[in-house]
Image (tube, rainbow, N blue to C red):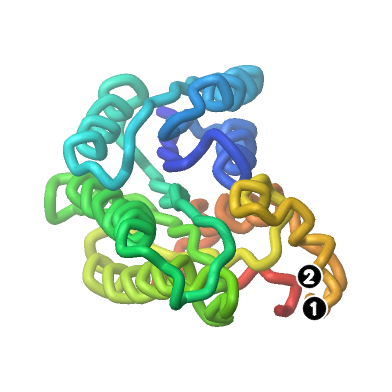
């Protein structure tokens, strides 16, 4: 039986790269998306081209009922979930902290914190040996922003990723003897479309001189690390926050 990977926010960027690499590695894949059905369908087609079973499911991870439906649909179609990649997240336009509206703050927290926790909760309920599961892994996609703070840009986003880091550590220790490993990757300056959505299409080129390696990273480089942490090669790795940031 193939392993099954559920990737939230899997229609673009790091999520899409992870889905394609997972299919190449032998996983069956569920690509979750919030809005862009066409992009999700393209990722699914790439996964199927590698011989994997793949599906796309629309769900807003900030809505509990939609998260539950996402997990149930994935399990019904592909089988028990072996790995959750908690990748869905939002980033608003660059702004100073003292201009943030409560609506902006609530949306970022709802998706990046509550959404990630809801997905992790549903994964634990299905994977944990305590609940009759056979174990599995969760890889949370955090950010170097969690330790850099993103001043003058996205302090709200950075704070939500700090919350994800803390959740990773605590939950990993809580379920370590229940067959579940939980780790986080913390990407730095990665060349994806998220910068354009924040109104900064040239952000990687503008800031890469601040990276010790003098370049931005790629989504596939982050996906490489996610696939390692999901694999049996990382069987004794849990509760780890792994930077993929070129030394920044």
**Can residue 66 be spotted in the picture?**
yes
**Can residue 134 be spotted in the picture?**
no
The quarter of the image holding the N terminus is top left
Classify residue 247 as left or right of residue 68.
right
Where residue 125 sits: x, y (%)?
Answer: 18, 49
Identify the residue at the far front of this view. 99
Classify residue 100 as left or right of residue 113.
right
Q: Which of 159 and 179 lies nearest the eye of the viewer? A: 159
Q: Please tell me in which quadrant of the rendered image residue 217 appears.
A: bottom right
Residue at x 52%, y 59% (from the top left corner): 229
Q: Is residue 234 above or below residue 45?
A: below
**Which numbered tag is attached to residue 207?**
2
Q: Is residue 89 above or below residue 161?
A: above
Q: Please tell me in which quadrant of the rendered image residue 5 appears.
A: top left
Where residue 159 sits: x, y (%)?
Answer: 42, 74
Residue at x 64%, y 41% (from the top left corner): 17
| Cβ–Cβ under 8 Å for marks 2 and 1 | yes
Where residue 224 sits: x, y (%)?
Answer: 65, 52
**Which numbered tag is attached to residue 210?**
1
Q: Which of 219 and 113 lies nearest the eye of the viewer? A: 113
Disc 1 element: helix
Q: Which of 194 and 222 lies nearest the eye of the viewer? A: 194
Q: CA distance from mark 2 to mark 1?
A: 6 Å
């Amino acid at each position: 039986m193939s392993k099954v990977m559920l990737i939230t926010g899997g229609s673009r960027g790091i999520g899409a790269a992870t889905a394609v690499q997972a299919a190449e590695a032998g996983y069956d894949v569920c690509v979750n998306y919030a809005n862009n059905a066409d992009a999700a369908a393209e990722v699914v087609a790439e996964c199927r081209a590698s011989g994997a079973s793949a599906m796309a499911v629309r769900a807003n991870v900030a809505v509990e009922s939609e998260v539950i439906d996402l997990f149930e649909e994935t399990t019904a179609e592909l089988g028990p979930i072996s790995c959750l990649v908690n990748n869905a997240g939002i980033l608003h336009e660059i702004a100073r902290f003292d201009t943030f509206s409560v609506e902006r703050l609530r949306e970022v927290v709802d998706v990046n914190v509550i959404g990630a926790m809801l997905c992790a909760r549903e994964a634990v309920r299905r994977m944990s040996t305590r609940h009759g599961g056979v174990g599995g892994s969760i890889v949370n996609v955090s950010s170097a922003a969690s330790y850099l703070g993103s001043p003058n840009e996205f302090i709200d986003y950075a704070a939500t990723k700090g919350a994800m880091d803390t959740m990773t550590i605590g939950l990993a220790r809580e379920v370590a003897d229940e067959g579940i490993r939980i780790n986080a990757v913390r990407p730095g300056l990665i060349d994806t479309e998220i910068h354009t959505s924040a109104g900064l299409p040239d952000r990687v080129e503008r800031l890469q001189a601040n990276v010790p390696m003098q370049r931005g990273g790629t989504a596939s480089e982050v996906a490489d690390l996610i696939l390692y942490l999901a694999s049996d090669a990382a069987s004794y790795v849990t509760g780890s926050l792994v930077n993929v940031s070129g030394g920044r």
